[in-house]
Image (cartoon, rainbow, N blue to C red):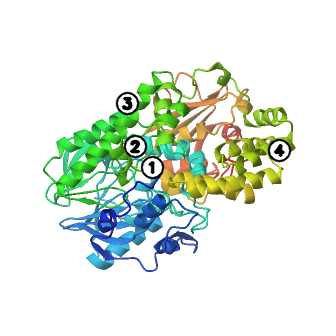
Amino acid sequence: MTSSLPFGDRTDFENAERGLIASLVPAVVKAEDGRVIWDNDAYDFLRGECPPTANPSLWRQAQLCAKQGLFEVTEGIYQVRGLDLSNMTLVEGERGVIVIDPLISAQTAAAALALYREHRGRRPVTGLVYTHSHGDHFGGSRGVLPAGTEEGVPVIAPVGFLEHAVSENVYAGNAMTRRAMFMYGDRLPKGPEGQISAGLGMTTSTGTITLIPPTLDITHTGQEETVDGVRIVFQLTPGTEAPAEMNFLFPDRRALCLAENATHNMHNILTLRGAVVRDARIWARYLDEAIDFFDGRYDVAFASHHWPTWGHGNVVTFLSAQRDLYAYLHDQTLRLLNDGLTGPEIAEQLELPPALETSWHARGYYGSLSHNVKAVYQRYLGWFDGNPAHLWEHPPVEQARRYVDALGGREQALAKARAFTQDGDLRFAATLLNHLVFADASDTAAKDALAGVYDRLGHGAENGPWRNFFLTAALELRQGPGTILLDSTNPEMAMALTVDMLLDSIAVRVDGPRAWQENLTIDLALVDERRRHRLTLSNGALTHRTVPPSGAARTAADLTLTLTKPQLLGLLAGGGSEKIDHEGDLGALDRLFSLVTPVDKSFPVVTP
């Protein structure tokens, strides 16, 4: 319930507007082909009163997140907010400007940098910092450092950044990006009945993701680096909001960057788009360490999302409450878990302490108490709740058909679902109607009824991604699956990956059953890195390892290719092998590629 929340407190609005220098007019960014990839002006409707189709608390958060433009945080530090899901921060040095977190898309990052330069001068980019390994914090890198301009510019990231950026955005990238369409609602019309916010920001841009690999790793807390005359002191926080993440202090500006470890909402322990489950225990511990480690050395704290907090005491209060939030989530879930409760049971029972429940920055606009509790449970005990009835259940379609039959058939099941809808039990109505849809994907009446239930659930949700999931599901039930627009498979992104990562990305697309009877070995002699990689396909699995130089391998390969990394990228993108030096059977390459499956960018989610 939101009736007890302090809607009269305008502190967040004052902070979100503080330091505004200029807004981007119009706040629209287009791709090279003219396609609109970002439109913040579409949220102008948020200036009105909250309608009955939106949760008042989420409406308030959306009003705050929609504020866009160039803002001064403190002398020499600026942020561009409202031009993507995340913020871009710019720190002025002796010769130019250090960019922190260049948004998701190269196009929005370029627009943000142009807005800064319009009002602060055409300073060159003299440093690039990635706070952590999520795509909305590195994807726009080529928008601020176009190809050919990066020489001599340090690119700083926490140790392990590249490995985790690839594992999340490449290996499972297609599935995550498809689910992210639901989480951020990028297909939904912007308006009181549609997409109004993602809680952490408005939505995601849909331009070109790029990645410039780091050149300087932060390996330990207390590490100090000077970039363009600016001193930076780092705190490593692995396993918090991202597997590789860091906070850092600008001691001469008395400003603290909290990355995405402390934002103005409850964050996710496990995002609805999918990710590695985060450790709420260690998250709380690193926030506590930040309070102590940076104590007395800052007057303002800012983050990769939302607006800053000014005043040392205010920041300590904020960090302390955020620490307690994640510690409470973790510890109370474990307490009830050890009493034998399952994840859904704990999620129904657990409540936050009153002081956290009424703190705006602890509200579940992005993460939620319900799905975070289930994530903590999953981290410790996995998907299985110990009840053997759940150990070997039928898959969704077969289970749905049996449920519908047990309810007396399609007409009886539909009538019962409508009765639950009429009685206001939307949760169980959705369950029954979902079974009807999965039992018969051509059942238009069931799909229409389920879409109507999802509309009502979405309009009442305080959590931005929940709203977007429900409303996108309703849209896809009515119109069919959407296609991923965000471009994460471009050559620029691929060039940033190591050869091992590129080969892993192919291995996870091999059609195992079709490859059961195929056995082959291919050696890749990479002349630009003086390494030889052996690919082995056997028992449907493609593995690879580094082997000694030519002539020292224990067995000969079916095919040896001598090539550069750009040539390898061309091969993997479907180019020919005619101009590549080789020994052996080129047919081995064709046999391998014939077993690599294409990705489906519009696979069904809410229908079978």
Residue count near mark 2 (Cα–Cα under 10 Å), binned few <14, some 14–19, many ≥20? many
Q: Which residue is mark 3?
A: 331
Q: Amino acid at mark 1?
A: Gly
Residue 588 or residue 219, whichever sits in front: 219
Q: CA distance from mark 4 to mark 2?
A: 40 Å
> Do tag 1 and tag 4 residues touch (Cβ < 8 Å)?
no
Could you tell me how many numbered marks the image carries? 4
Choose the circle earlier in sequence order: 1 or 3. Answer: 3
Choose the circle earlier in sequence order: 1 or 4. Answer: 1
Q: Which residue is mark 4?
A: 440
Residue count near mark 3 (Cα–Cα under 10 Å), binned few <14, some 14–19, many ≥20? some
Q: Which residue is mark 2?
A: 242
Can residue 224 be seen at all in this image of the molecule?
Answer: yes
What is the quadrant of the C terminus in the image?
top right
Q: Which residue is mark 1?
A: 364
Comparing marks 3 and 2, which lies closer to the viewer?
3
Choose the circle earlier in sequence order: 4 or 2. Answer: 2
Q: CA distance from mark 2 to mark 1?
A: 18 Å
Q: Amino acid at mark 2?
A: Ala
Give the SS element for disc 1. loop
Left or right: 578 as drawn, with respect to 37: right
Image spot of residue 42 (x, y percent): 53, 73
> Up-down: is 432 above or below 395?
below
> Do tag 3 and tag 4 residues touch (Cβ < 8 Å)?
no
Which label is found at residue 538? Answer: none
Q: CA distance from mark 1 to mark 4?
A: 35 Å
